[in-house]
Amino acid sequence: MANLITSSRFVLLFILVAMAYLAPPVWQLANWLLLLVVIILDGVDGYVARQRGETSAFGSAYDIAVDRVVENVLWIVLADLDLVPIWVALVFITRGVLVDTIRSQGAARGETAFGMMKTAVGRFLVSGRFMRGFYGAVKAIAFAWILLFQPVPAVFPAFWAQWSADITLVTNLLIYVSVITCLVRGVPVVWEFYVNEQPLQKTRAEGNR
C-alpha cells in the first residue's frame, strides 16, 4: 500500500506538469493545490508503511528516488516555462547527483544517508530534523507560490499589473533561499565524504602491498 501511494505521486506529478503546459489559465489556478497533494502524500506513504509494517530498504530507496524526481522535474519545468532561471534547475540537479552518488557509496558500506554524517555541523545541517523540515518547507512554498501565480497574468491582468513587482520579489527571495539551503546542506555531504574517504583509501593501499 505504501509503495502504491508513492507511485501515485508520480501520476499526480505528471498530471501537474501537463496542467502547467496545456491547461487553460483558469484551470491552472488549481495547480498549487495539486502540488500540495503531491507533497502531503510524501508524508502519508511513510506513515502508512510504519503503521502496516511495510517498511523496507526498497520502500525507503523508492521514496527517496520519487522525492528527487518530483523536485528535479518541477525545477526543470518551471525553468522551461521561464518561471525560474535555468541555472536554478542546474544547481539542484548537480547537487542531487553528487549527494545521491556519495550516499550510494555509504549504503554499500551499510551506512544510512543521514548516518554518514560524522561531525556535529554535518549532522545539524544534513541530518537534523529542523534543517530537513526547513529545506522541505522552503522548497514546497517556493513551488506552490510560483505555480499559484503562473496563470494570474492571464486570469487577473489588473491584479498582476498592480502587484507583479512585489510578487516577483517574493518569488526571487524564495528561489534564492531554496538554492542557498540546497548548497548549505549539500556541501557537508561532499566534504565529509572526501575527508573520511582518505583514510579508507590509505588503508586499502597498505592492504594491497
Image (tube, rainbow, N blue to C red):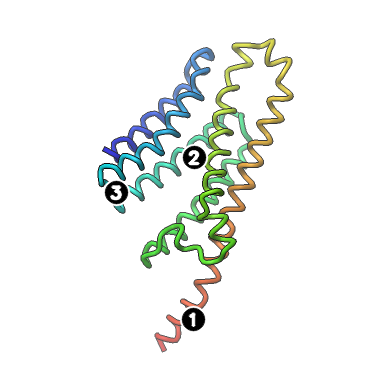
Q: Is residue 190 left or right of residue 158?
A: left
**Decide: marks 2, 1 in contact (CB < 8 A)?**
no
Q: Residues within 10 Å of mark 3 (few under 14, many from 20)?
A: some
> Between tags 1 and 3, which lies in front?
3
Q: Amino acid at mark 1?
A: Lys
**Decide: marks 1, 3 in contact (CB < 8 A)?**
no
**Where residue 42 appears, x then y in whole percent?**
41, 38
Q: Residue at x 44, y 41 (%)?
A: 69
Give the CA separation, mark 2 to mark 1.
37 Å
Disc sitting over residue 71 in the figure: 2
**Where residue 145 appears, x then y in whole percent?**
59, 28
Q: Earlier in the sequence, mark 3 or mark 2?
A: 3
Secondary element at image label 3: loop
**Where residue 206 appears, x then y in whole percent?**
44, 86
**Where residue 123 appears, x then y in whole percent?**
53, 59
Q: Amino acid at mark 2?
A: Glu
Disc 3: which residue:
55
Q: Residues within 10 Å of mark 2 (few under 14, many from 20)?
A: some
Q: Residue at x 49, y 39 (%)?
A: 71
Disc sitting over residue 202 in the figure: 1
Q: Amino acid at mark 3?
A: Thr
Disc sitting over residue 116 in the figure: none
Secondary element at image label 2: helix
Q: Residue furthest bottom?
A: 209
Q: Residue furthest front?
A: 51
Q: Earlier in the sequence, mark 2 or mark 1?
A: 2
User: Which of the 4 image quadrants contains residue 81?
Assistant: top right
Q: Earlier in the sequence, mark 1 or mark 3?
A: 3
Q: Is residue 1 left or right of residue 36?
A: left
Give the CA separation, mark 3 to mark 2.
23 Å
